[in-house]
Image (cartoon, rainbow, N blue to C red):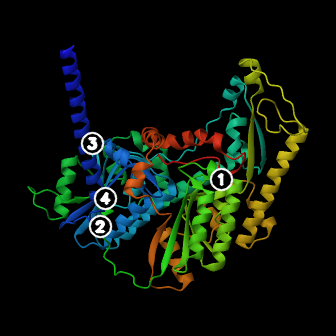
Amino acid sequence: MKDFLKYLLATVIGLCIVGAIFTIIGIASIAGMVASSGTETTVKDNSVFVINLSGNVAERSQSNPMNQLLGDKFTTYGLNDILNSIHKAKEHEKIKGICLNAEAFVCPSASLQEIRNALLDFKESGKFVVAYGGNYSQSTYYLASVADKVAVNPQGSLAWHGLAAQSMFLKDLLDKVGVEMQIFRVGTYKSAVEPYTSTEMSPANREQTQAFVNSIWGQMVKNVSESRGIPADTLNALADRNMDFQPAEAYIQTGLADTLLYKDGMLAYLKQLTETDEDDNLNTLYVEDMVNVQRNIPKDKSGNILAVYYAAGEIGDGALASDEGINSEQMINDLRRLREDENVKAVVLRVNSPGGSAYGSEQIWREVTLLKEKKPVIVSMGDYAASGGYYISCAADWIVAQPTTLTGSIGIFGMIPNAQKLLNDKLGIHFDVVKSNRLADLGDISRPFTEEEKNLVQGMVNKGYELFTKRCADGRKMPVEDIKKIAEGRVWTGEMAKDLKLVDELGGIDRAIAIAAERAEITEYTVMDYPKQEEFFLSLLNSTTDHYLSAGLKEQLGEWYEPFRIVKNLKNADHIQARMPFILTIN
């Protein structure tokens, strides 16, 4: 017995010591991360800014302490961090150029265009831009085409094959499990409901999809043609050959690339460009480093604030909103504070949303209208500002969009399942009901709607559509009849939307900021981003298991994460939606 107690005590003491050691290591790791996150980066002479075109791009990135503690790779970049880093590199005299390192990269079309334009602006400094890749995706090649020299690994590949938009249809699956989706909508082109009711695209959906795919591809071909000096017709002919499967030598022969190099050859070339001795290390900086490089600009003393408010993700209604999207209740409170803050002279509303709750969109629209009465409001559209995303944008003084932004989709739909066959026939579950009034159980998924109930819900959807089109007409100063001609739920690119007067100007967020300053009549100001991002320790406390699992799924699923997330959040979504039917990714 004594031996047993002795060994037990030794085990307990050992566990306590191990626990204490791990606690100390954990605290030291957290302290180290906190210290490193706030430490200004020292830029060495003849440095190269290396942009790893890998992972995902979001409007803004929020560092996740759990990811860092568990050793996960830095896979989600904030578009704002990339753009700011390029601007800093242009201004910093010790940074001699940029090297684009092409890897697996998930980035929507408008963000690609914004990064590409920033790289073109960087080149005006006279500094070099070079690109290297073993396997260029079409999106990374689109960015790399701005480079002075595009290098491909001799055994590598370069994707150039055109665009394709594919939709997934679930009707047959739902039929097999015994679920019928009861649909209520306004808008011939409002095709978000089609995956649940059809097995292929409707003619209207096919028409709009073909139109915006052609528009985005036309922009890509035009931009690459200008940078590489290859006629547009030739680029289309090369896409028809699907250059992904051509030998590397073909990329040089066709002018898509300039040279074939292994990694060591690229390193030697970068040392040559920076006049670095062969035996010395090349000084490199990455986006993570550039975030903590200070910009070389005079400190503003005016006290004027130009607010950039980021509205990114699906629009949710208060408590039903997703953690990854726009909480309408939080956003209207934030906008009200900006309205009441006398130091805020103008607001740029950065919208990157495919829409969502019709009710939530209306509440945000109201707050944007009140904000505009006090100070200029300029909308900068990101990858998407469609349906509810356009709803919250239309009241602004001026709307700026990228040519490849997806916008419009002015329409409303409702979708409520009828699971009677699943519950009764397949699972053997039956329901009975006692009610005080005739329509007390409207919306019960255990039975189909009656005609009276269908008329009630469709009437609500019709009312929502009339309100939506009126908001757009008032904001754009157009007759409602003209809005309805281009509404019907149809999706447009920014290039097409400008011709239709849904958008005022083509450009990026920098242009929107410049317009906001002009409208506010201020020349000195500080740009501040809202809503404020969480501090490190608060982010650590809020890093729940769900947050960590979502980050892991995003890393593993890549471009398929967004459709998965939409389906996952359906249970919390409003029944009446103003939402775009798809998410487009360029591969």
Q: Is mark 4 on a helix, strand or loop?
A: helix
Discs 1, 4 touching: Cβ within 8 Å: no
Label 2 and label 4: CA atoms lie apart by 11 Å
Q: Which of marks 3 and 2 is in front?
A: 3
Q: Which amino acid does label 2 sit on?
A: Val
Q: Foreground: 318 or 458?
A: 318
Distance (Cα) linking label 3 and label 4 = 21 Å
* Pointer 2 with pointer 4, Cβ within 8 A: no
Quickly name the residue at label 4. 37
Position of the N terminus by quadrant: top left
Tag nearer the camera, 2 or 1: 1
Separation of disc 1 and disc 4 at Cα?
34 Å
Q: How many marks?
A: 4
| First in residue order: circle 2 vs circle 1 | 2
Say whether disc 3 or disc 4 marks the residue closer to the N-terminus.
3
Secondary structure state at the residue bearing disc 2? loop
Q: How crowded is mark 1: few (under 14 residues within 10 Å), some or many (20 or more)?
A: many
| Residue sitting farthest toward the left | 279
Structural crowding at the residue carrying mark 4, measured as other residues with C-alpha within 10 Å and reported as few (<14), some (14–19) or many (≥20) = some
| Residue receiving disc 2 | 293
Residue 285: quarter of image: bottom left
Q: Mark 3 points at which residue?
A: 23
Q: Residue under circle 1?
A: 317
Name the residue nearer the viewer: 394 or 4: 4
Q: Residue at x 33, y 69 (%)?
A: 88
* Label 1: element kind: loop
Going by the numbered disc 1, the residue's amino acid type is Asp
Quarter-of-image position of residue 348: bottom right
